[in-house]
Image: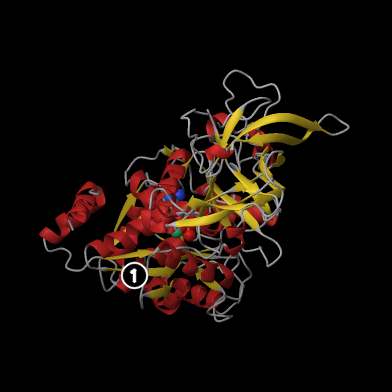
Amino acid sequence: MASETAEVVAGRDFIRDIIDADIAARRTTEVVTRFPPEPNGYLHIGHAKAIWINFGVAQEYGGRCHLRFDDTNPTKEEQEYIDAIKRDIHWLGFDWGRHLYYASDYFDQLYDWAEHLIRSGKAYVDDLPADEMRVMRGSLTEPGCNSPYRDRTVAENLDLFHRMRDGEFPNGARVLRARIDMAAGNMNLRDPVLYRILHAAHPRTGTKWCIYPTYDFAHGQSDAIEGVTHSLCSLEFEDHRPLYDWLIDNLPVPSRPRQYEFARLNLGYTVLSKRVLTQLVRHGHVTGWDDPRMPTLAGLRRRGVPAAAIQDFVRRAGIARANSVVDIAMLDHSIRDVLNKTAPRRMAVLRPLKLRIDNYPSGSGEELVAVNNPEDATAGTRRIRFGRELYIERDDFMEAPPKKFYRLAPGREVRLRYAYFVTCREVVKNAVGEVVELICTYDPATRGGNAADGRKVQATLHWVGAADAISAEIRLYNLLFDRAEPDTGSDLIAELNAMSLVTLTESRVEPALGAATLGEPVQFERQGYFCLDPLSGPNRLIFNRTVGLRDSWTKARATDDQGVEKI
Ligand code: ATP
Ligand code: MG
């Protein structure tokens, strides 16, 4: 298809340039990539970028992408995360087929290769305590110095390494280090740790091991075992690449993978650090990994964000070599773009105010016709019931309206969507002076929402019938953090937006919404896109706001609760 070709051409980037060159020079015949999550948390929208790049590139070149769990630290990893990661990748629209792997599958091989390094004089067992080792590594400006254990004999090293494996020593007593160069400009080459002692049961290998390889020792070798050709990762691994290459060059690995780095996705007002996200969950600042305020894929899904919108967003954010922060409004834009075409329109009143039409006959009212989606003619129409008593949005009325407020006010005429023109005649208040009801009249000659005499009104309001509306709880989500670049170092709680969740329990929605199903987006007219929350039940409707209709967040964040500015 022409449009697809255009997409691909528009999507050129430095990674595709590298692959093109490799293919042209016959260095690569089949493109093999991998996505290597550590199962110590849920995937977030930053991971979606890495997934989209690795799976997307493989797909485009007719190759394959492996899903490999980087499960080298049994103290932090859980089955729950493995299951969630698989679910989220599938939901995003990618599939690893039969190429599901675990770094732990390679523990035997990695162990043999560690011995290989020892035998060739390129690794040694070090007894230095961790803090001394840290000091002796030097700094960016100072070279490190050699450990007193660096010149142990091969036989002594082999013996100690075996005894580490056999569980003779406690955690932290010894490590296996590569023997490279303590004066190297790149700190990662200053005799990096390859194996550490960890007396912990592993979800997959049980108690077979009490020493575990580090990320650096496991990663490149796993790539080589699987025949990965292009190991695409984020920029923080750039400084690890010389070590990646050193290990590949010094081990009898079956293939020669290459690592390339791209810039991580950073988003304004959003934290994409698993450490911080874990903290938010553990300390109860959110209800879980799938809290709709979380930037996790599970959270975004629950908020109603379609997978297609996330794909569109990461594609627009693009692949670059330089770090930058992407405006969160760009994500909202992608979400609206997808939902606008697909979401049926419905009427829901978030903060109801009673409206009585004095001159409308009492009784069961009448049926009117409403359009399901003006963007999609095939979506058809539905019937809605109009009557003498209705609810309108509290924010759509002001007793003393300022200049630019065009909605309902005493003596003013407005249109009720799909129905009639009504004029506000009287304001009823309670004992403390709050407006509790509006008494109006309607013009029967405006049925369907147009006046026979051609007269105009300045506003069209949505409404629901008091007789048949359904009660619902509506959850409005706002940014979880107050500042564009939250400081997550010290006081995380102080950075949180107190208004990140506004729960409305008095909302009324039109009867058609009683049939809403999970995963189906809807647009509440004039309000935004919403979806049913999984906690809904037969007698309890809960809707989550996915996104508002316009870029109202910057100007209306503080007033979101009133919504007065959003005309
Ligand atoms: P940590 O290493 O702190 O646990 P992480 O987010 O890097 O967190 P991993 O499970 O190691 O978690 O990530 C898997 C892959 O996802 C890595 O290869 C990493 O490059 C990529 N990735 C993680 N965060 C982002 C991001 N914000 N943008 C792009 N890619 C990312
Ligand atoms: Mg990582």
Decide: is 5 above or below 425.
Answer: below
Residue at the extreme left: 25
Mark 1 Cβ and ligand 2 under 8 Å apart: no
Asked if residue 181 shows in the view, the reply is: no
Q: Which one is in front, 164 or 442?
A: 442
Toward the viewer: 178 or 478? 478
* Percent coordinates x, y for residue 200 in the rendering: 61, 73
Corner quadrant of residue 209: bottom right
Residue 125: image location, x then y, percent: 49, 66
Residue 119 location, x and y as percent?
37, 73
The answer to whether one can see residue 387 in this image is: yes
Quadrant hosting residue 28 = bottom left
In percent of the image, x 71 and y 29: which residue is there? 425
Q: How many marks?
A: 1
Q: Position of residue 87 (x, y in %)?
A: 49, 68
Tell me the quarter of the image containing the C terminus.
top right
How packed mark 1 is, by other alpha carbons closer than 10 Å (few <14, some 14-19, many 20 or more), is: few
Residue 538 drawn above or below residue 353: below
The answer to whether 165 appears left or right of 238 in the picture is right
Q: Residue at x 44, y 46 (%)?
A: 336
In this rendered view, identify the residue nearer to me: 187 or 515.
515
Horizontal arrangement in the rendering, residue 430 relative to residue 182 (left or right): right
The kind of residue tagged 1 is Ser
Residue where numbered disc 1 is placed: 120
* Quadrant (top left, top right, bottom left, bottom right) of the N terminus: bottom left
